[in-house]
Image (cartoon, coloured by chain):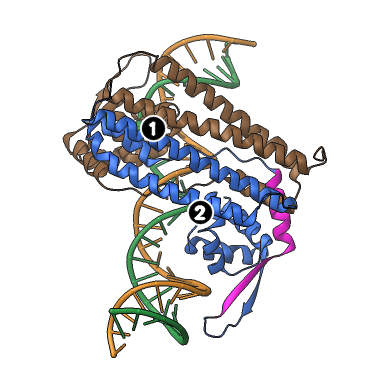
Chain colours: A blue, B brown, C green, D orange
Amino acid sequence: MALEHAILVSLLEQPGSGYELARRFDRSIGYFWTATHQQIYRVLRCMERDGWVEVRDVPQDGRPDKKVYSVAPPGRTALSDWLAEPVEPESVRHSLAVKIRGAAFGDPAGLIAETERHREVHAERLARYLAGEQRDFPESAELDAGQRLQHVVLRGGIAYERMTLDWLDDVLATLRRLGGAPEPH
Amino acid sequence: MALEHAILVSLLEQPGSGYELARRFDRSIGYFWTATHQQIYRVLRCMERDGWVEVRDVPQDGRPDKKVYSVAPPGRTALSDWLAEPVEPESVRHSLAVKIRGAAFGDPAGLIAETERHREVHAERLARYLAGEQRDFPESAELDAGQRLQHVVLRGGIAYERMTLDWLDDVLATLRRLGGAPEPH
DNA sequence: CTTGTCTATGCAACGAGTTGCATAGCAGGA
DNA sequence: TCCTGCTATGCAACTCGTTGCATAGACAAG
């Protein structure tokens, strides 16, 4: 499992509550790891039980109190150990690709709207990543090691979204060619 | 869940046993959906119970008998229904990216070997996809709708692997710049 | 003759991830 | 005033996916 390690990394970058972590998993961490607040709260409890993280109750006014977590020495050790051991390259799961191949036995034209919807989602993600890049990694800035590593991961997210957009255009062209509108000649 | 639908698509393309399906999920279907034989056998039983697929016992000599599954009319309906309803764009999970960001709190140079290993795996996948493309979709061939859809999905796998290789090169350059070898100036 | 690999199916247990719901105070708009 | 939405945490139940193991005949290599 890598969720606990993703949480360790996030807490090392910045301590925070389960709720704050959940929001980070919707944003910056979201382009390489996703998690719901349920998973996060559950895993945080396990990590606290194992001594990987420490909790501090922070009362707030106008808002519910929160528990701020930070990484304890055993957590740092656990992260180092995990960094040293190999992980398998991820396997992919794209239900849209299943649908595209399934369209051969159904209605290819009916998939166009769905594909366009996916395209919009990815275009939005790309715009968000590019805005984040401009904000956090401006040209000709002095970056420390942590920032350089964050930037290269973000570049991966950007490359992924660009590639996906190009592919979805290819898919749309293919679907349109099959469904009625013949290729111009 | 899309596994059952991926199985429906695969069985429509070609009926087969659970074992054969498992092998297809290691090859052609593997670049957009993965599944182990355990999952497949379990889901096949559910699909049979629901009348989505039909079984035929096929005795073989020199080999264990097999159960050949094919799609029944309710299965085709279920697939059409699923094709018509929207699915959410997949969320990503790249533990290597977690490691890269975690390297800021450990040893960036120690990640180089791991990254190179991932690079090799993706280079092999790309080579396999390209070989499959040459074999199944030669230039200037007349393709029917099903083949065109298979091809566009394969092109997606190829684009993904190419993008990943480029990104891993970027990652390696970044790690090397951080770990000892300073940037030339 | 034993060891290993391939075909072929399957059980049992576990771990990871999702979904629905609950609580509870505060802020802002219809 | 009521309804919605945000912060903040959490339970319970469920589904999905993984891992280890078991069976069992055929065949090839050592």
How many numbered markers are drawn? 2
Q: Mark 2 points at which residue?
A: A128
* Residue B42 falls within the magenta-colored stretch: no
Distance (Cα) linking label 1 and label 2 = 23 Å
Vertical arrangement, residue B105 with respect to residue B136, above or below: below
Residues marked 1 and 2 touching at CB (< 8 Å): no
Q: In this view, does B179 lie to the left or right of B81?
A: right
What residue do we see at 33% from left, 32% from top? A173
Image coords of residue A137 (percent x, y): 65, 53
Q: Nearer the viewer, residue B109 or A84?
A: B109
Image coords of residue A6 (percent x, y): 60, 54
What residue do we see at 60% from left, 33% from top? B166
Q: What stretch is highlighted in magenta?
A: A65-84
Which chain contains the residue that carries disc 2?
A
Vertical arrangement, residue B176 with respect to residue A82, above or below: above
Q: Is mark 1 on a helix, strand or loop?
A: helix
Q: Which of A153 and A70 is in front in this view?
A: A153
Vertical arrangement, residue D1 with respect to residue B88, above or below: below
Q: Name the residue under label 1.
A: A170
Which chain contains the residue that carries disc 1?
A
Where, by quadrant of the figure, is residue B25 drawn? top left
Q: Which of A85 and C1 is in front in this view?
A: A85
Question: Residue A113 has which mark?
Answer: none
Q: In which quarter of the image is the C terminus of chain B?
A: top right
Look at the magenta stretch and give its main secondary structure: helix
Q: Is residue A148 left or right of residue A103?
A: right
* Residue A67 falls within the magenta-colored stretch: yes
Amino acid type at mark 2: Arg
